[in-house]
Image (tube, grey):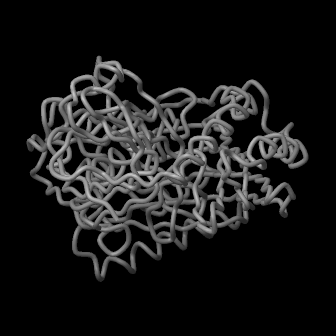
Amino acid sequence: MNRDLATAAVEHGRELGAEYVEARIHHVRNLGALLRNGNPEPAVISDSYGIGIRLIYRGSLSFVATNNLRSDSVKGLVEDALRGAKSSQRILNDKIGFGKEKMSRSKWKAKEKKRLENYGVDVMIKFLKELDKQVKHEFKGVAFTNRLLSVSSEIEDKTYVNSDGANLDSRVPRIEFSSYLASSYYGNIESFTIPPGYAQLGGTGGWEVLEDLNLHEYIQSKADDLSSVVKSTGKPPDGNVDIILGPGVTGLVAHESSGHPEEADRILGREAAQAGESYLKREDLGLKIGSDEAFVSDDPTLAGSMGFYLFDDEGVKAKKRRLIEAGYIREFLHNRDTGRELKTGSNASSRAVRYDREPIVRMANTFVEPGDHSFDELVEDVNHGVYIESFMEWNIDDKRLNQRYVGLEAYVIENGKVSRRIRNPILEITTPKFWSSVDARGNDLQFTAATCGKGDPMQGSPVWTGGPHIRLRGLRVGSR
C-alpha cells in the first residue's frame, strides 16, 4: 500500500509538469522509560506516521506533508506543492536543481535479533531498576542523591520513491541508555551524566544492543570514578603542555569542529539563521588545516551505529565520507542540490527525522580515524602534560572556529606516567590550531551515541561520535 501511494504521488506530480518529484512515507515509533531515584516516571510514547512530498517546478522547490494517507488527500497535497512552487518563483533568486545520481531499487534493514516491539515499558523499568541498584549507595563517601536513568527505543520505517527511479523500503530500530546523576559531598552539589559528556550508549538493533553493553558493570565503575572527581582539588599545570584526549572528547571535537563546518549547506550560507555558518568557504577543498596525523571521517554504513543507513532520503547510496585526510579538507557533506552547485555530486548526506521534516544535510557517524599507538605509548612520550579522559561542558561559535572544552575526569602526566587527578582543565582553542597540534592517534577507536540538532523546525538526528585517544603537543590549559 505505501509503495503504491508514494508512486501515485510521484506520478501525479510529473503529470502536473514538475521536473522532479519525491514521496517519503515515514513512520517513527518512540518508547521511553524513565526512573527517578528508583521510582518510575510517566512513559514517553509517540507515533509519527505520514507522507512528505517535495517537487521542483522550473527551479522552485516546494515541500508539503500530511498524516492523512487517503489517496485523494495525497493527490491534493501534490497539487498544493505545485501551487507553492509556482508562487515562490516570484521571489526566487537562485534556481534549485538536483544533480544526476545513480538511483536504486532496494529493501534494506538494520540487523535486529530481539525485536524492540517485544520489549515494553515494564521490561525497560525492570532493567533500569537493576541499574539503579548499582549507584544508589555511597561511593567513597559520595552519595548520588538524585538519579535519573533512561532507556528509549525507536523504530523507523520508510518507503521512498522519486521520479529519477529510486524505490526504497527500509527499517531501522534503535535503542539507547542515558543517565543523569547529582552528587552531594560535604554540602557541595555537582551533576554528571553516565556516560560523561551528556552522551548516550546505544545503536541500531534490538534489545540485544543494551545487553551487549554490560551496563551493570559500566555504570558502577563510572560512578566510582565520578566520586573521585567530586573530591579532587588538583590544579592543572601552568604553561604549555602536551595533552592526551580520551575517545569521548575526541569524538565531540570531530563532530563539532569538523563535521558541522563541512556541511555544504552551512558553507553556502543556507543555515546561517538556524544552525550557523562555517569558517570554510566553497573553494576550501584541499585546504591544509591540520597536521599529517589529522584524519576525520563520517560513515553512515557502520553496522550497529546510531547513524546507520544504506540510502539517504534523496535516494543516493550511502558511503564513507573522508572529511579530513592528513590535515587536508577532502570532502564536504552534500545533498543532491549542494553537490550539483559545487560540482562534486551528492555523497548521500540528506536526512529527515520525520515525515513532516524536509531532508537536510546531516552527519551520521563522525569520528577521528584510529592510528597505531597504544594508550601507554601515547603517554610514555609525554614528560609534562595533561590527560583529559572525559568532558563535562563545551561550547563553540556559530562558524565552528573558536571552541572551549572543560575536562571532567582529568589527570596530570609526569615523566611518561599518568599521576594525580586535576579538576576541570580547560582547553580553549581554534579549529586549525587544534588539528595542527595532533601528533599521534591511538588504536582504540570507541563510539558514543548522541543526538545532533539542526534545522528549523528542529531535527534531532541520531548519530555516533567517536575516535581513539589522541595526543596534542604544546598547548596551554586553563582552569576555573
Q: Position of residue 122 (x, y in %)?
A: 91, 47
Q: Position of residue 255 (x, y in %)?
A: 36, 48
Q: Position of residue 348 (x, y in %)?
A: 39, 41
Quadrant that contains the N terminus: top right
Q: Quadrant of residue 66?
A: bottom right
| Residue 33 horizontal side relative to residue 340, left or right | right
Q: Is residue 388 above or below residue 305?
A: below
Residue drawn at x 42%, y 40% is 389
Q: Is residue 237 above or below residue 79?
A: above
| Residue 183 horizontal side relative to residue 168, left or right | right
Residue drawn at x 24%, y 28% is 415
Q: Position of residue 28 (x, y in %)?
A: 69, 52
The one of 159 and 387 positioned closer to us in this rendering: 387
Residue drawn at x 78%, y 60% is 44
The one of 137 and 52 positioned closer to us in this rendering: 137
Residue drawn at x 50%, y 32% is 310
